[in-house]
Image (tube, helix red, strand yellow):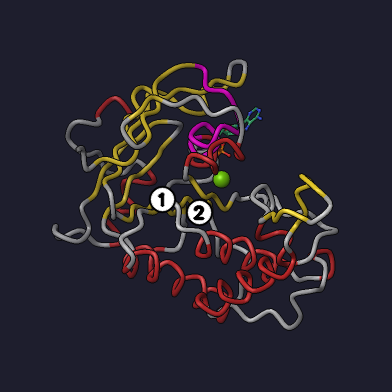
Amino acid sequence: MSDIILETRNLTKHYGGVHALQDANFVLRKGEHVAIMGDNGAGKSTFVRQITGVEQRTRGDIIFDGKPVNFSGPIDAREAGIETVFQTLALADDLDVPDNLFLGREITKWNFLGPFRLLDYRSMREATLAGLEKTAVKIPNIRNSIRNMSGGQRQCVAIARTATFHSKLTIMDEPTAALGVQETAQVENIIRTLKEAGEPLILVSHNMRQVFDLVDRVVVFRRGRICANLDIKNEDISGEDVVAYITGAKTQAGYEDAA
Ligand SMILES: Nc1ncnc2c1ncn2[C@@H]1O[C@H](COP(=O)(O)OP(=O)(O)O)[C@@H](O)[C@H]1O
Ligand SMILES: [Mg+2]
């Protein structure tokens, strides 16, 4: 058995003439937490959208859990075990918290009238409460529809969803960019919980403090290409070094193409 959970080979996405992602070769090992960093427009979200099937790639291979995959959409990716918090939140406005947590994977039970699958609200509610408790996310009333929630609370619901369901891989695209200090701390606790549980994570973040606190490794994107792979746990790499790779002031050996 391989210890690699996700690998991309020459993953490329062009939007017409815009080379948003070019030949990304990326490896994530089981249990590993990796940050993706890079300037705005560097291709980070494009990379996430190709892996999760939100868009169809121009070319390249995606190998997930040992098999080449071609997800038709994010629900397909979720069914395969990839839980994603997208940069633009994909929460349904009119559903309440449990419904949003279970979107696409409702618990059903058989009813006495025959073979009709009914939503089992009681189980969903109990699982929601257990999930939120586990993540220390504070939501005043979970029966409120998402529409009435602040951006931070919405984000927390989406993130709680990733912690509620044990997935093979969690991806978070700038999960704390719109959050306050307390909510950010809660999300960081969720990330630590995933790490302790041995669940791998890809974290897109601009927050250097957060990245150095939480992850094992930093992969830097620049103008659609991976330009550095930094083992921040074992090597003497500072935040300033990472910024230098992000801006292109520094080039890592082996990545001269991206300079
Ligand atoms: N749907 C799209 N159509 C055309 N260009 C796009 C589209 N999505 C992203 N881009 C372009 O691709 C590049 C990478 O964008 P993105 O992946 O969102 O960057 P990041 O997440 O690193 O800020 C940018 O130049 C952006 O303008
Ligand atoms: Mg982005």
Inspect the magenta stretch and tell me whether residue 99 lies in it.
no
Image position of 82 (left or right of 87): left
Residue 220's spot in the image, x, y percent?
35, 44
Q: Residue at x 22, y 58 (%)?
A: 232
Quarter of the figure with the C terminus: top left
Question: Can you tell me which quadrant of the image ligand 2 is in?
Answer: top right
Inspect the magenta stretch and tell me whether residue 51 lies in it.
yes
The quarter of the displayed image where residue 109 is located: bottom right
Note whether 198 is above or below 187 in the view shown: above
Q: Which residues are magenta?
A: 47-58
* Marking on residue 202: 1
SS class, disc 1: strand
- The alpha-carbon separation of the residues under discs 2 and 1 comes to 6 Å
* Marking on residue 172: 2
For disc 1, the neighbor class at 10 Å (few under 14, some 14 to 19, many from 20) is: many
Q: Residue at x 59, y 27 (%)?
A: 72
For disc 2, the neighbor class at 10 Å (few under 14, some 14 to 19, many from 20) is: many
